[in-house]
Image (spheres, grey):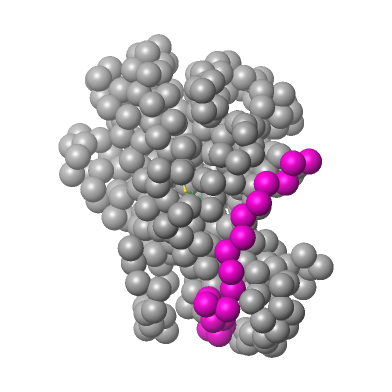
Amino acid sequence: MPNLARTHATRPLERVPNPGMLAEVAAGLAAPQKELSPKYFYDQRGSELFEAITRLPEYYPTRTERALLEGWMPELMAQLGTRTLIELGAGNAEKSRIILDAMRATGLAELYVPIDVSATFLSQTAAQLRREYPGLTVEPAIADISVELNLPRRMPRPALFAFLGGTIGNFYPPPAIRLLSRVRAAMAPGDRFLMGVDLRKDIARIEAAYNDSQGITAEFNRNMLLVLNHELGADFDPRAFEHRAFYHTVAHRIELHLVSSRDQVVEIPGLGPVAFAAGESIRTEISTKYDRASVSTLFDAAGLRIEAWPIDPATPFGLVVGAPA
Ligand code: SAH
Ligand code: AVI
C-alpha cells in the first residue's frame, strides 16, 4: 500500500487543474454539515487506494460487475456494432478491457476515450492500453465530469458511453441528472449508455464493504486531506481524523465521513482558519444504492430510457443499458 507519510509541496499536480477548488472547499466547509466532493479523493495515491479497495474481500461491486460484463458484453457489442467506447471515471480501466475485447472480436473497435479527473493515473492507463490494443486509438480526456465531458470532436459511431463501478451513486440526484443529461446530449442515434449501479441490499453487507478489516477504505478517505494539503497548502493532520461509514436508510446510501478526533483548527491559505470540534465530521462521499424505480426516475429526468437491465440478483448489483428516450 502507498505510504501515508510523504511530502507534497514538491510534487506536480496529479489531478485536473481546478481554479474553483478553493471556493468549492470554502463553501463545503462553511455548511452546517461540512462536506467535500469525493472527486478530491483521486490523486495518484487515491486512485491506487481505490484500486486496492476493488480487490478487498468485503468490496463486492467490482467483481460482481466484472462477471456481469463478461456475461453480457460479447452479445451486446455484436448487436450494437460499437466503434467508440467513451468511459466516464475510467480509473485503471480494468473492466473496460472486457468491453474492448468484445468490440475487438467484432473487428470494429476504433477509439477509446477514457475520461477521468486523476490526470497522472489516466495517462498511465492510456499508455498501458495502447500497448495492449495495437490498432485502437486511445484518446484520454482529463475532465471533471460534474462540469463537462471534454469529448474529442470526431468519434466513429455508433458509440457506447460507459459509466461503471456504481460511480453514479457518488452524485446527489440533481448533479446526477445533470451528468446523465450531458451524456444524453452527446449521444447520436444508435449510441447506447451502459451504467453500473449498486443495488439495495442487506445493510450489514454494504457497511462491511466500506469498513474493511484492513483499513484501506479509511486510508482512502483520509487521502482527501492530503489532496487538500498538496493542492491548497492546507495543514490537515490526517491522523487527527477518524474514518466513519454508515448506511442512511431513508436516503438509501452509505455515507463516508472524516470525524475530528479532537478540537482543532486547520489553516487553509486564502480561506483562513477552519475550526473542528471533537466529534464533528466532514462528509466526504455518498454512495447511493438503487432499485429499478430509482434508476428509472434518474433516466426519465435525463431523457434516457432503460433498454436492458441485467442484474446479479444474488449480490445484487446491476448493469443498465440506456438509449435516448
Ligand atoms: N470505473 C472504475 C473506477 C471507479 S472509481 C471502476 O469501476 O473500477 C471512480 C473514478 O472516477 C476514479 O478514477 C476517479 O478519479 C473518477 N472520478 C471521480 N469523480 C470524478 C469527476 N468529478 N470527474 C471525472 N472523474 C471522476
Ligand atoms: C467510486 N465509487 C463507486 C466507490 C463507491 O463504492 O462508492 C468509491 C468508494 N468509496 C469507498 N469505497 C469505495
- Percent x, y of residue 313: 54, 20
Q: Quadrant of residue 19?
A: bottom right
Picture quadrant where residue 276 is located:
bottom right
The single residue placed furthest to the right in the displayed view is: 32
Q: Position of residue 161 (x, y in %)?
A: 48, 32
Name the residue at 49% across, 74% down: 226
Quarter placement of the N terminus: bottom left
Residue drawn at the location 67% of the way across and 87% of the way down:
265
> In the displayed structure, would residue 269 be above or below residue 308?
below
Relative to 82, say whether 237 is above or below.
below
Residue 30 location, x and y as percent? 77, 73
Q: Is residue 16 above or below residue 158?
A: below
Q: Is residue 233 magenta?
A: yes
User: In the image, 179: left or right of 116?
Assistant: right
- Residue at 62 percent across and 67 percent down: it is 258
**Rendered position, 256 above or below 63:** below
Quarter of the image with the C terminus is: top right
Q: Nearer the viewer, residue 55 or 93?
A: 55
Residue nearest the observer in this picture, 202 or 151: 202
Residue displayed at 34% across by 17% down: 74
Q: How many numbered marks have been drawn onto this rendered protein structure? A: 0
Give the magenta range.
231-250
* Residue 214 in magenta stretch: no
The quarter holding residue 111 reads top left
Left or right, residue 41 beside residue 273: left
Front-most of 53 and 212?
212
Nearer to me, 1 or 69: 1
Q: Is residue 278 left or right of residue 120?
A: right
